């Protein structure tokens, strides 16, 4: 069991949005983020996106026309 690949980390990052990661998965992801700038950036953007999505109420496209 070596370091997870970028692909695995990307998968985990998106799965994290749907379900809590296991301790192992979380650890592997953290480990990879320590050594991989690309994934750190990717993961950061994912977190920002998630925060932004949480702030917004679920948007109904028909209602947004009101403005
Ligand atoms: Zn990576």
Image (cartoon, rainbow, N blue to C red):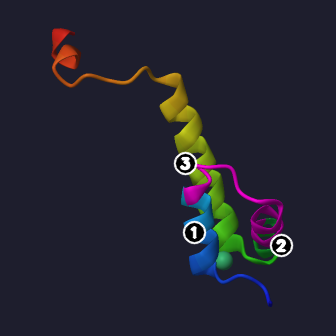
Marking on residue 10: 1
37, above or below 47, in the image: below
Q: Position of residue 2 (x, y in %)?
A: 80, 90
6, above or below 45, in the image: below
Instruction: Find the distance from the CA under tag 2 to the CA under tag 1.
Output: 13 Å
Does the residue tagged 3 have its C-beta within 8 Å of any atom of ligand 1? no
Find out whether the residues at labels 2 and 3 contact each other: C-beta distance under 8 Å: no
21, above or below 66, in the image: below
SS at badge 1: helix
Q: Nearer the viewer, residue 42 or 18?
A: 18
Residue at position x 32%, y 24% in the image: 59
Task: Return the disc, 1 or 3, that comes first in the chain's sequence.
Answer: 1
Range shown magenta = 15-29
Task: Return the disc, 2 or 3, that comes first in the chain's sequence.
Answer: 3
Q: Which residue in the protein does label 3 denote?
A: 18
Does the residue tagged 1 have its C-beta within 8 Å of any atom of ligand 1? yes
Marking on residue 31: 2
Q: Position of residue 42 (x, y in %)?
A: 59, 62
């Amino acid at each position: 069991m070596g370091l997870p690949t970028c692909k695995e980390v990307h998968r985990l990052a998106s799965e994290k949005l749907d379900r809590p990661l296991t301790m192992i998965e979380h650890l592997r992801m953290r480990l990879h983020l320590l050594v991989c700038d690309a994934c750190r950036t990717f993961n950061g953007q994912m977190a920002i996106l998630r925060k932004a999505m949480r702030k917004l109420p679920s948007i109904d496209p028909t209602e947004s026309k009101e403005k």
